Image (cartoon, rainbow, N blue to C red):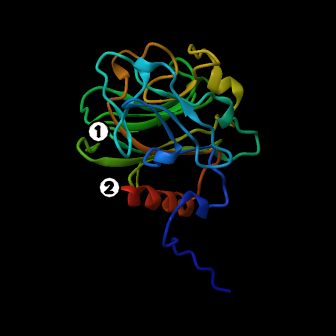
Amino acid sequence: MIINRRTPDTPHPSNLSLNPRMFFDFADRNNTTFSNSDVQGVKGKSSASVNMMQTIATSQPADGGTDLFFDDPVNEQFMDAGADFILSDSSRSGLTMMFLVKHPETTTQKFVYDIGGFAGTGYGMDYTGTRIGCYTPINHGGAQTEKNPVDAPTSGWVVIIAVIKFGDSQKVYINKNLEAQTAIPGLSELSAATITETATRGPASGPSVIGTTSKTPAGTRIWKGNFKNGLIYDEALSDYQRNILYIYQRNKISV
């Protein structure tokens, strides 16, 4: 028997048997709620995906037309997705996070996505002009994994992917390429303890956020730039599955 492993002509998360726990496409105007020129809410695009909200007017990102634009030099802008949606049971293999972003900063650490609390807890991704990485709860057997230094794009779009396989390793991909990996034999599962420990925004606002840290305040680490879309799976996706999603992201804009 010959099995055709060719990537589908129209790569899309629906090509996978898995249902993303978070799936946002900010170019989909039908799923977006506006407040003047800002974005107040974005509806998740899969049956398992939660909605993302920001009811605080000064913290709402701007409408970039086909993306979210975080541009306020004073106020902390972020989108909140709560926390319970991402909880995994012990039978899950891991976690995969993928975001299509544009980041003009070159020197200061900024947070793409964060779920959890203070340093040493939680999961997330961060990005500067010299470093792209992901992190898992160090106090539960996780680690920081990053490509540093890296010639990260500062004027165009980039796909950042983190694949975390519990009890094994976590890997960071920049666009299609594997750039860094770390062994995490001690991190066995994603639990309530690892994502809510010491989070300070409270159950009504976090601890799962796009554009800043789950704790408050984030100081200079508030995201400045654009988000096109985001996907999170409570599985460690295979190379084949990850490539389907990368092409889906790439087709959104040339990267």
**Few, some or many C-alpha atoms within 10 Å of disc 2 (few <14, some 14-19, many ≥20)?**
some
Q: Quadrant of residue 43?
A: top right
Q: CA distance from mark 1 to mark 2?
A: 20 Å
* Image disc number at residue 149: 1
Between 53 and 94, the residue placed more toward the observer is: 53
Question: Compared with residue 96, is residue 117 higher up or lower down, i.e. above or below?
Answer: above
Q: In terms of image quadrants, where is residue 13? A: bottom right
Q: Quadrant of the C terminus?
A: bottom left
Q: Earlier in the sequence, mark 1 or mark 2?
A: 1
Say if residue 19 shows up in the picture: yes
Under circle 1, the secondary element is: loop
Q: Position of residue 52 (x, y in %)?
A: 55, 33
Q: Which residue is mark 2?
A: 255
Residue at x-position 71% and y-position 45%: 92
**Secondary structure of the residue carrying numbered label 2:** loop
Residue 154 percent location from the top left of the image: 24, 41
**Kind of residue at disc 2:** Val
Name the side, left or right, on which 204 lies relative to 246: right
Q: Is residue 159 above or below residue 220?
A: below
Across and down, in percent, residue 167 comes to: 65, 42
